[in-house]
Image (tube, rainbow, N blue to C red):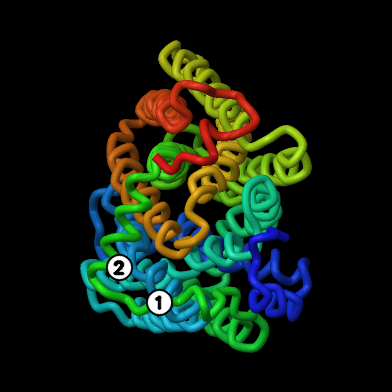
Amino acid sequence: MSSAMTDTTRAAARKISMTEFVILIASLMAITALSIDIMLPALPAIGDAFNVLNPNDRQMVVSAYVIGFGLAQLIPGPLSDRFGRKWPLIAFLAIYTVASAFIVFAPSFEVMLIARFVQGIGSAAPRVVAVAIVRDRFAGREMARIMSYAITVFIIVPVVAPSIGGGMLYLGHWEWIFWLLFLVGVLLILWIALRLPETRAPELRHPISVKSLARDFWAVLTTRQTTFYTLGTMAAFSAMLGYINSAQQIFADIFDITTSFPLVFGAIACVLAVASFVNARIVERIGMRILGHSAAFAFTAIAAVHLLVALSGYENVYLFCILLGLNFLAFGFIMSNYNAMAMEKVGRIAGTASSFVGCVQTCGAGFVGYVVGQAYNGTVVPLTAAYVIFGLVAILSALIAERGRLFHAHGYNPGQRR
């Protein structure tokens, strides 16, 4: 635990075991992955139910959620800095839960997309506040380690979510998926209300004003390390969303994989758990920068090889899964370490900083990922070309954040904020 913890925060932290804490944080972070990935097998059925003629338009069920999720992340961070972490978290989860139920009764595709947008808004706090809670208790490499353990646990969700969605379609109807999300929201609200301690010390809370918000967001924006590692995570997350948007079409149209799609999708997602678990075990010894920067270069090199394979016409399902799995392996190291480095210098305003990081990361990735998905043309060339670009952006962002010094053990100057 960070030596910077206050007595109040330390006393609160003792009320929950480390194992339960990690699982709860992972569950909060995973609600977004669940809300997206469980949809993938159901997209054709949802499109048929609402008479959506263009298959690419079905991707909007994912994109509407992601955009709402991204935009709303500017709100819960400052609220949690002012009122504590717990109650803003419960309030946003209540929005998520109500929206999940409303989707079932949507009379049109357009209304459903609006409800998905609101559902995304409700899921903003779990992501933002979860990161702030971890930052309240830990810092630096220790935070990277805890985040990696949490990511290892929550990766179970994208592994099993498509299978759950497919199972519900087999047994019933696509509406069952949203009733499940409703139940998840209710259970998380109860878990937080009964078990989660408050980690934001009362002496750190200050009244919200336009001036204080502007000051805090400006402090985050002008912290070079935070801003550019945020852009790096946005690029990496764009790669993930670009794949998620077009995954069902890629496997069905190119590789003729339909009924076994959830299993293949889940198998590839397992690689993320491996990356996060290994990172958690070695990051305190090797360092965030060496691991994160190496992963960005590896991601770019693998993507370049995959692009050449796609252009050559020798693409097959085995090469696709192997090369994509290697990219996901690198992605796991990038996200864990880049996120920790983005938060490294802004612990005093962790909620606001987490809002900034989450909003830029998700809104940017949501838009770019949607563009990549819409570029799908019956081949994997648009996806693999985008991966090369995303990798280069992740490398360039790290170069600017570290003033040109990569692969070193510490930041460019701990005493400097800019």
378 on left or right of 88? left
Badge 1 density bin: few <14, some 14–19, many ≥20, Cα 10 Å = few
Q: CA gap, disc 1 to disc 2?
A: 9 Å
| 90 lies above or below 162 | below
- Residue at 49% x, 73% y is 204
374 on left or right of 69? left
In the image, what residue type sits under mark 1? Answer: His
User: Residue 287 occupies which quadrant of the picture?
Assistant: top right
- Residue at 70% x, 73% y is 10
Q: Can residue 249 be seen here?
A: no
Q: Nearer the viewer, residue 80 or 315?
A: 80
| 338 lies above or below 108 | above
Q: Nearer the viewer, residue 161 or 352?
A: 352
Q: What residue would you read off at disc 2?
A: 212
Q: How far across and how far down the image is residue 211, in percent?
A: 24, 67
In the image, what residue type sits under mark 2? Answer: Ser
Marks 1 & 2, CB-CB < 8 Å contact = yes
Q: How far across and how far down the image is residue 35, in percent?
A: 47, 64
- Residue at 72% x, 79% y is 11
- Residue at 52% x, 31% y is 412
Quarter of the image with the N terminus in it: bottom right
Q: What residue would you read off at disc 1?
A: 206
